[in-house]
Amino acid sequence: MTEPTIFEMSSPGRRAIKMPAVDVPEVPLPKGFERQNLAFPEISELGVVRHFTRLSQLNYSIDTGFYPLGSCTMKYNPKINEATARIPGFGHTHPLQPEDTVQGNLYLMYHLQKMLAEIGGFAGATLQPAAGAQGELVGALMIKKYHQDRGDFQRLRMLIPDSAHGTNPATSAMVGFEIVPLPTDPRGNVDLEALKSLVDDRLAGLMLTNPNTLGLFDENVEEVIKIVHQAGGLVYGDGANMNAILGVAQPGKIGFDVLHYNIHKTFSTPHGGGGPGSGPVVVAERLLDYLPDPVVDIIEEGDEENPPLYGFVTPSKTIGRIKSFHGHFGLLVRAYTYISMLGAEGLRDIAEKAVLNANYLQEKLKGTYTLPYDRSCMHEFVLEGFWEDVPEIHALDIAKRLIDYGLHPPTNYFPLIVKEALMIEPTETESIETLDRFAEVMLKIAEEARTQPELLKNAPHHAPIKRADELKAAKDLVLCCYPMGLGQD
Amino acid sequence: MFTPHTQKDVEVMLKSIGIEKIEDLFTEIPEKFRYPKLNLAPRLTEMEAAMELESIASANGSTKDLLSFLGAGAYDHYIPAIIDNILQRGEWYTSYTPYQPEISQGTLQAIFEFQSLICQLTGMDVCNASHYDGATAAAEAMILADSHFRGKRNKFLVSRAVNPQYRAVMRTYFQTHDDVHILGDEPETGIETDLQKLIDQIDNDTALVLVQYPDFFGRIVDYKPLIDAAHAHGTLVAVATNPTALGILTPPGELGADIVIGEGQPLGIPLSFGGPYLGYFAVTNDLLRKIAGRLVGETQDVDGNLAYVLTLTAREQHIRRGKATSNICSNQGLMTLAATIYMTVLGKEGFKEVSNLCYQKAHFAAEQVGQVEGFTLAFPETPFFHEFVVKSEKPVADVLEWLRDHDILGGYDLGQDYPELKGHLMIAVTEKISREDIEYLVAVLEEEYHD
């Protein structure tokens, strides 16, 4: 099934939107700068509507089905969030308006900073980072500056567990840290002996995802943090998996110095087909002054008649501005709405049901699929998508076969330390019926692998396209609707 | 509310797992840290939350109630109704990154179309699936240039007429690189449009020159001499561009730019107090493999049908980890879709119309404001697009406050970022501003001067 591109649909002279006539005396266009041609498509409005509607129907989405994508927390995105983010008083404010005309926005940001700090057990927050990866960059820059301010210029080694997301080493490299891989022990925890052998006065810190990407809460987390702190390092928390411990534990209280949230995971803002994300960062007391410029604070205390006056302030040792304006504000409104509707009680319910769902599925699948770390899991778990008796079947084949049953595949081939990994995160918003059906299909696929392996090898059979040739895409490189470098204008 | 579990479901699940209560699943968390009391307000129902958020928003004065001449990097354009209608389809906004191409052809083709439109608009060969915003795209241009010269060129020249927030973000990104020097935007280099002082600083150690087109002050400057001078030293040139202006202006690709970046907000994305927007990032074929972020390419499925996939992923962090081109993981997904629909629905003629409307109305406004006693155009001889600078005899803060009393957001006080432009006000005009709006602004300004 193919949909023509907008360029193929174009017909000279056709119009969708027409703009009003110029209502002022016209002046000539700037001489020497006039554009000769703009080859944008010419399509009717209905043509555009049908094109983007038909394209949407080629997508899988949370609204249409179960999305057990490990590490991504594909939970239901409440519709009320979409409504509140579109309230004109939020949506139509310019980022450079005088502060006294945007007290509503500043109130919301101030209180969201407080909420996120409280949920994580930290002292302060920045809402500026555009995504988790940018949150990591903020954290890494603050850690580096903290050490430099103390004269510890030699602290350049960042410990990163072998189970970590790729962004952790990529971020550390961007700020000039030396990346030191940290092995995982047989129970899926940080290897304590290895950790002890790697810390010295060159240590900048540790980037730890907890629960980790195996879906396991590190049983020695207190000890791990103690070792790093005693060696003078700071502990960065990758909060990708915060959904598992909302209202159950606060990383800041356990000893983490800084942590980013992925509010598009934990706090239900939509993934939007790849973004926008939002990655607020929360910090312990000692990093407060290093937060990006600016943060929202109370400028003038309120009294019985007047609310407080909110405004932007610059932290004294700030690492500087990390993006334009004030972060992904539209997503902050959604997260604020979501947290307001949960409160402490609801947050704990989220974590408990997310973990309950994952353990229920793990229990149903672990006899049929190898579970390399056989422990009670948190919000997700990792299976091996591989059986010794059918070596030709890989995790990829299982993933693609799930598509035929109308289900989204789990994350596969991550984390790297599990062979043929299938990483499954059901989230709290799924019902027992959905989980049962998924388990049933997974068991059926395990059976098909033995009886009709070609069904898996050639899957999917019932999707808009069959398996795509990724090698050809990289070899022939067609990245535009016309051959590269040709056909423009 | 958002969890569907009945009491019975929970019992069935606990029994299946072989535990008695949900708390048993959390015993690996040290007991003293378990179940803290969170100091949060009691939970609200949906109706209460809706009302609460309405109430918070009502403390704002929005551009719906105020006549706004604010720009400086974010612009209030008309957004066709079709865009948000399509964006609100769950198949678009509740889908994940298209890592499974068989069930993500919609998102993949939309990104492919976005890449094509941006290449067409900028006159470049290749465009990625977007960065966070214009400022981070500028920082990524530096990262690209740094890696292009493998760290052997350490000088990065940035025009003082580039958006101050872009410059701030570039410095934040590179603050830990002791060998990297960001120069060119010092007060001594100035903001003259002949660019000679900037050109004089280009040498064989210069990795990148970044200029803005139209520049931060809205001026249209001929960058050909600068680009030629840079290329004579093998230096890369990045041009930050307002996409709306490219409806009528020669694209930077035709001027010889190596990298074209910019803030995509004007392409159908609401102001939303500064985000989410999108940063677009386009390069020449020569730099294709150095580009960061997601790229969509065309291919075939096993039956030979046309298909789209994410491609050249070996550059990215999830494969290359510590050696990736950047740590960027997401793109601005839904915002690129908004921009794609915007460019498509306006199309060839509509896009030019918007661009021309902005240009014409801004020129009418400049001419009118320039005639008000106490106000003079700061750069009367320089062509400009839809934003212009006026010098005010009275303090800009007072002028803005006066305008505010008349429900007008008068523009941007340049003295905040440029000490040499104290007393200068920058005014932006989009197609949404009518002739009457401009005449009202002028009338209020006249009244203010004589007050």
Image (spheres, coloured by chain):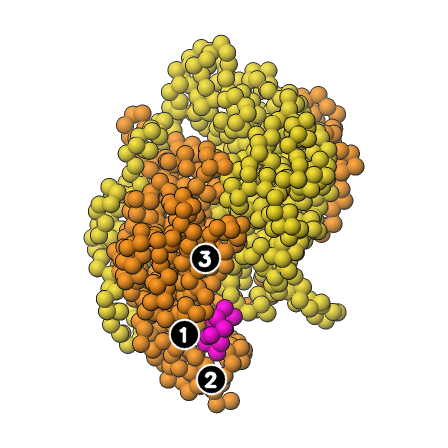
Q: Are marks 2 and 1 in contact (CB under 8 Å)?
A: no
Residue at 48% over, 50% down: B179
Mark 2 secondary-structure assignment: loop
Residue at 59% over, 20% down: A371
The residue singled out by tag 2 in the image is B393
**Residue B401 in the image, given as x and y percentages of width and height:** 54, 78
Q: Callout 1, which amino acid?
A: Val
Q: Which chain is orange?
A: B
Q: Which chain is yellow?
A: A
Whether residue A53 appears in this view of the structure is no
Q: Is residue B415 magenta?
A: yes
Q: Callout 3, which amino acid?
A: Ile
Q: Is residue B366 magenta?
A: no
The reply to whether label 3 and label 1 mark residues of one chain is yes
Chain ID at mark 2: B
Residue at 30% over, 47% down: B284
Specify few, some or many for label 1: CA neighbours under 10 Å numbering under 14, 14-19, or 20 or more. Answer: many
**Residue B158 in the image, given as x and y percentages of width and height:** 41, 60
